[in-house]
Image: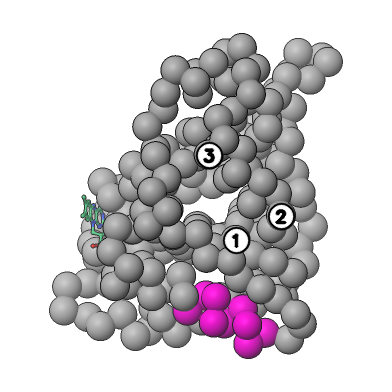
Amino acid sequence: MHALIVVAHPNPGSLTHAVGHAISAGLAEAPGAHRGEFADLAAEGFDPRFTQDDIAVHLEGATPTADVLAEQARIARADALVLVYPVYWWSMPALLKGWIDRVFVNGWAYGTGADGKVEKRLRHMRVHLVALGGADQRTYARHGYFGAMKTQIDHGIFGYCGARVVRSELLLVEHGEDGAPQLEQARDLGRSLFAREDPVRDLAG
Ligand SMILES: Cc1cc2nc3c(=O)[nH]c(=O)nc-3n(C[C@H](O)[C@H](O)[C@H](O)COP(=O)(O)O)c2cc1C
């Protein structure tokens, strides 16, 4: 099986990158011939800005630009999509949000069915979300930030397209910590990425 591990962080020396690599290493250790493909959106220079070409795809069904088609093709080649990102302002970084805005488009990720209702086109897709945050658990709990992220990202984005969010993790690393437990957790996540064969369930709405 093949996992596309998408990392959205400008610094290749960051803990976020190390977590992405730990997931990939864990996947290689798992029984079976699994493979992780690393997609470093920052190093690859993915442009997250939504352009007139993108709005033409959304409104008029125009063909997406080559960079968007290439992203859709590599997602389509994968059995699982793993997103690894730092929490910026209680959500995902703009680089990753722009990637989703431009790539998960009308006509590919979803469409309009014959009955005029939204057609979810990514029902086959399994998604694993791994967010890293610098705030503490109490802050997240007090304000319901992680619940808000799950509503917006797991349900609002992937549920809308019919994809199954298999895992949604928040790894908190407070100032001064070395991140070793989080890296071990990431390795475990990689080892068990394809272990669970959950039925694809619809996130309603
Ligand atoms: C612009 C910016 C916004 C941030 N906002 C949050 C936030 O809302 N909540 C949080 O827990 N951490 C926040 N952080 C901290 C990052 O999530 C944290 O530094 C990162 O996860 C640590 O991983 P890294 O070493 O890979 O950067 C923010 C960091 C930056 C640079």
Q: Is residue 200 above or below residue 65?
A: below
Observer-side mark, 3 or 2, equals 3
Query: Is 113 placed left or right of 87 in the picture?
Result: right
Query: Is 74 placed left or right of 18 in the picture?
Result: right
Q: Where is ligand 1, by quadrant?
A: bottom left
Question: Label 3: how many residues lie within 10 Å, few (<14), some (14-19) or many (20+)?
Answer: few
C-alpha distance separating marks 3 and 2: 16 Å
Residue 176, x across and y down, in percent? 16, 79
Q: Is residue 87 above or below residue 67?
A: below
The residue wearing badge 1 is 4
Q: Secondary structure at mark 3?
A: helix
- Residue at the spot x=83%, y=15% of the render? 114
Residue 26, x across and y down, in percent? 57, 82
Under mark 1, the amino acid is Leu
C-alpha distance separating marks 1 and 3: 17 Å
Q: Which mark is residue 151?
A: none
Instruction: Tell which circle, 1 or 2, labels the residue nearer the N-terminal end.
Output: 1
Residue 97, x across and y down, in percent? 41, 41
The residue wearing badge 2 is 77
Question: Label 2: how many residues lie within 10 Å, few (<14), some (14-19) or many (20+)?
Answer: few
- Residue at the spot x=41%, y=80% of the render? 183
Q: Nearer the viewer, residue 91 or 65?
A: 65
Which residue lies most toward the front here? 66
Under mark 3, the amino acid is Asp
The residue wearing badge 3 is 67
Residue 120 visible in the snapshot: yes
Residue 84 magenta-highlighted: no
User: Over which residues does the magenta segment extend?
Assistant: 22-30
